[in-house]
Amino acid sequence: DQQVKQNSPSLSVQEGRISILNCDYTNSMFDYFLWYKKYPAEGPTFLISISSIKDKNEDGRFTVFLNKSAKHLSLHIVPSQPGDSAVYFCAARIGGADGLTFGKGTHLIIQP
Amino acid sequence: EPEVTQTPSHQVTQMGQEVILRCVPISNHLYFYWYRQILGQKVEFLVSFYNNEISEKSEIFDDQFSVERPDGSNFTLKIRSTKLEDSAMYFCASRLAQYTQYFGPGTRLTVL
């Protein structure tokens, strides 16, 4: 039952370049999407979110794009920095519900 | 910056024992959550709590689990009779009115 899928377990990007993390979902009832970043032995840290009525949201180096017709969202990090090395989780909320559904995560490694 | 705190950071218990995991949500937040992450798997929603009652729970949250907000600051998860498969990281989260949930650092529960 993978309603939120992150198909790349890991991604390696050179420092200063763009990191693009992808997430696909299957449930049309999702109306709000979030990206979290997680370091080992810490809890998920909120990065950025987007409502299903929008197709883009930007916050500093982070931009999330939502393509509802494709049921796809992506997180862009520009420029990538060493401190960005972490596991990134895509999460989604069903309208009217409260619990978040998470993807399995993508481990981003920023190479110097 | 206010944050969610959790104690203990690591709890070791014998199978069949009761454990209580504690959380202090962000002080003005209204909605409280428990999630768990079994090693190597995705973060899974357990339960949400609002206005002193459970607002939503997942299939995982069976009769072995209970939650309580015993005072104005703490939020607890009790597992009545722990099983080996309850070994996981348990994350508490909270939010105000908007949908973004803020997570604590987690409690690692090890059941022997």
Image (cartoon, helix red, strand yellow):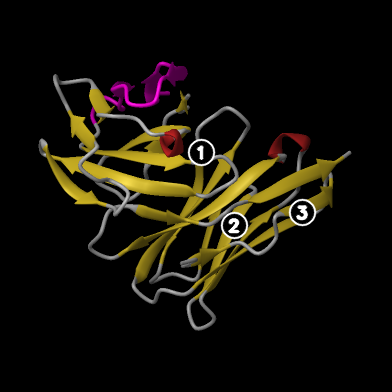
The quadrant where residue B111 appears:
top left
Residue positioned 41% across, 73% down in the render: A27
Q: Measuring from the top left, give residue A3's x and y in whole percent.
A: 46, 67
User: Is any atom of residue B45 visible in this view?
Assistant: yes
* Name of the residue lying farthest toward the bottom: A69
Residue B53: x, y in percent?
A: 11, 40
The magenta-colored residue range is B1-28
The N terminus of chain B: image quadrant: top left
Q: What is the three-letter code of the residue carrying label 3?
A: Leu
Residue at far right of view: A112
Q: Nearer the viewer, mark 2 or mark 1?
A: 1
Amino acid identity at mark 2: Thr
Chain at tag 3: A
How many residues crowd mark 2 within 10 Å: few (<14), some (14–19), many (20+)?
A: some
Closer to the camera in the image, B60 or A10? B60
- Give the CA separation, mark 2 to mark 3: 17 Å
Residue at figure coordinates x 50%, y 41% from the top left: B38
Q: Which residue is mark 2?
A: A63
Callout 1 amino acid? Pro
Task: Classify residue B102 as left or right of residue A90.
Answer: left
What x and y, as percent, mark residue A68? 48, 78
- Residue receiving disc 3: A11
Q: Nearer the viewer, residue B77 or A44?
A: B77
Same subunit under labels 3 and 1?
Answer: yes
State the SS at label 1.
loop
Query: How would you rate the neighbour count of disc 1 (Cα within 10 Å): few for under 14, some for 14-19, many for 20 or more?
Result: many
The residue drawn where x is 40% and y is 69% is A52
Q: In this picture, is B42 found above or below B95?
A: below
Is B48 magenta? The answer is no
